Every structure is written in structure tokens, then in C-alpha cells.
Image (cartoon, helix red, strand yellow):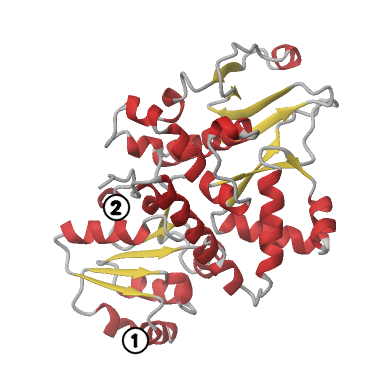
Amino acid sequence: MIKRSINIDSEVKKGKVLIIYGSRQVGKTTLIKNFLSETKLKYRLVTGDDIQIATELATCTETSTKNFVDGYELLVIDEAQRIQNIGLALKLMVDTFPDKYYIATGSSSFDLASKTAESLTGRKNVIELFPISQQELVNKSSRSELTRDLESYLIYGSFPEVINQNTYQEKEKTVKQIANSYLLKDILAYDGIKNSGVILNILKLLALQLCSEVSTVEIATKVGLDYKTVMKYLDLLEKSFVIFSLTGFSRNLRSEVNKMSKYYFFDTGIRNALISNFNKLEDRNDIGQLWENFLMVERMKKNNYINFSTNYYFWRTYEQQEIDLIEENSGKLFGYEFKWKESKTSAPRLWLETYKNAEYKEINNENYLDFVI
């Protein structure tokens, strides 16, 4: 079993709700059950998919709250976003029984976050769980094994069930099932959205423009929707942990590009499933994009799990000088250029002239592990 970077023991606090976000199949329920198997607290575990439980909690009465928590020290609600009024229900529990522990999980932040934002102000801790990270894998595999299996992570991704498959054929089948059966379930259940075809078309366009600046106006034209609707769908896809975006870094130099965003996938396997491309690296023409996406998301996982706060950007000028990733933290700028093979690139001249105290480094397949672990 792969030890996850999230330690629930250190995160759960008496009188507060620990909310764990993450996409479907990322391992939230397994994480919870592993914690419960070792806790000495008397607990109750329920799911928002249970109609009886959902109906009971949605009433938000003192009686329903007392009946739910009575006799337990720890209350755990899986898929909590499915319960109407869940924010008020959790608030009532915490306010009425502040000596107990509470955990709620959600596979989509847009729904659960909106239901708990005001109700649980000052009463919650929030953590995110991602597909398996390289940092987590190093606890089970050596660095040389991670490097040996790098091609598999780039092509098939890092969902727990995918990693646990023994053959490439099984990995491909599993990641296709995740993409087709689970990926859009929460999005299509939100706000009466029914047209899965449009969502998939948007995702395929993003997959084909991986790591490139994306014109949302152009996407709207290609899928036959208005601009505002496309932006709404992109927002939902980000809040359901399918994609994330980077904006351009700019300190108002006229030559810096900052009007369009780049989009990345939280899992490269999902991206490859969307375009039905599981070819080996030697037979692909998108290895540079896969590599950039992989490093971006692994870096974000690492920083998130160690609670390191930083801002992420890309940098490009109209003269085509560019840097793949800019991190801004501790009052400094750090530039990273991603190259599949070592090429000993140097920082763009304008970057050095404009940001004299900024750092710059090339990340390639020889030195990447120190960047993501």
C-alpha cells in the first residue's frame, strides 16, 4: 500500500470540520478508512449517497443533529456535497457538540465549498488529495525505480487504481474507465447540466492545446457556445479537479503576455484518454507537453502537501522569450524551464535584465526528482 502524504491524525481537530477535497477515484475513501482502522475514537461513517442519511441531515434540526452524533466521538461524512444544507448541518453539529471531531469529504469543491463557505467560517480545515504523487511513491519505490517507470506515469497517469495494475493494457483500460465513467459525474449533476458531449469537446480541445495559451473565445466558437457558458464550464472543470490554469506573469512591461491562460490536467493519463493516445514516448510528438504537464502537477502536489505557499505563473513576451513556470514566494521569483532532455538552457535576456534577483533553472529527466520530491 502506498502511504499518502496527508496525515489525518495531525489535521483533524476537536470542534472543527476537516474537509477533504479531491476528484473521484483519487483515494479519499481509502484514506479515511485507513485512518478509521487505527483510530481509538468511537466513530460513525456515513455517505451522502445514502438517501436516508441525506434526508435526515438536510432537515438541520436539533433532534436530527442529536440523533446523528449521539454516542460517537468522531463523525465522518463521505461525499458530503450530495447532502442538501450540509453546511448548516455541519455548523449545527459543531456549535452544539464542540467536543467532537468531524470529517467531510467531497469529490467536487464547487458544490461542497459553496454549501459550507459561510456556514463554517472559522470552523473548518481544508486539505486536497490528488492522484498519487512522486513524493508518495518514493516511500515505496527507489529513485531508480521511479525513473525506470517514468514513461508509465507520463502515459497512464497516477490514479491509485491505475498504478496498482500490472500491465500497460490493464492501466489503459482502467484510466479509460475513470475518464469515461467518473470524470464528469459531478459536473453533469451540477445545476442541471446535461450535455456531456460539449464538456468532452471542451476537454479534448484543451488536451490538444496542452501547455499552450488557450483562447477561450476560439473554444466557444468551435463548440458552438457563448463565451460566458464556456467560462462557466472551465470553472466547473477546475473546481472538480480535472484541470487547472496558469496566468501569465507580468509587472506591466509592455512586451509581457498576460491576457490568456495555459491549461493543464491534474492527471496526464486522463488527458491521454481524452485524445485516445497511449503511444509509447518514442512514437509521440507531444512529449514536451506531457513532460511540462507532469512536472507542473507534481510540483503543485509537493508544495501543497508540505503546506508551502507559492504563486504559479508562466512568462512569455511578444518576442517569444518564455519560461514555463514562475514561482513567486518569500519575496523572490524562481523561474523553471522544462526540457525532456538536458539542454543546458540559459535564462532569457529580458528576464535577467528585468528581474535581476530572480533565479532560473532547467528541469530535465536527469534532475527532475529533486524538483518534485
Q: Nearer the viewer, residue 282 or 294?
A: 282
Q: Is residue 164 above or below residue 199?
A: above
Looking at the figure, which quarter contains the C terminus? top left
Reading the image, the residue beneath label 1 is 64
Give the residue drawn at x 37%, y 51%.
Answer: 160
Tag 2 or tag 1, which sits nearer the N-term?
2
Is residue 129 at all visible to an observer of this figure? Answer: no
Residue 79: give x, y in percent of width and height: 42, 69
Q: Secondary structure at mark 2?
A: helix
**Real-space CA distance between mark 1 and mark 2, rounded to the nearest whole angstrom:** 27 Å
In this figure, what is the number of numbered marks? 2
Looking at the rendered structure, the kind of residue marked 2 is: Ile
Question: Which numbered tag is attached to residue 306?
Answer: none
What residue occupies the far left of the structure in this picture? 40
Give the residue drawn at x 63%, y 13%.
Answer: 345
Q: Is residue 251 left or right of residue 326?
A: right
- Of circles 1 and 2, the one toward us is 2
Question: Which numbered tag is attached to residue 8?
Answer: 2
Q: Is residue 82 above or below residue 293?
A: below
Residue 176: give x, y in percent of width and height: 51, 57
Q: Marks 1 and 2: CB-CB under 8 Å?
A: no
Mark 1 nearby-residue class (10 Å; few <14, some 14–19, many ≥20): some
Residue 30: give x, y in percent of width and height: 30, 59
Q: Nearer the viewer, residue 197 or 308?
A: 197
Q: Is residue 241 above or below residue 258?
A: below
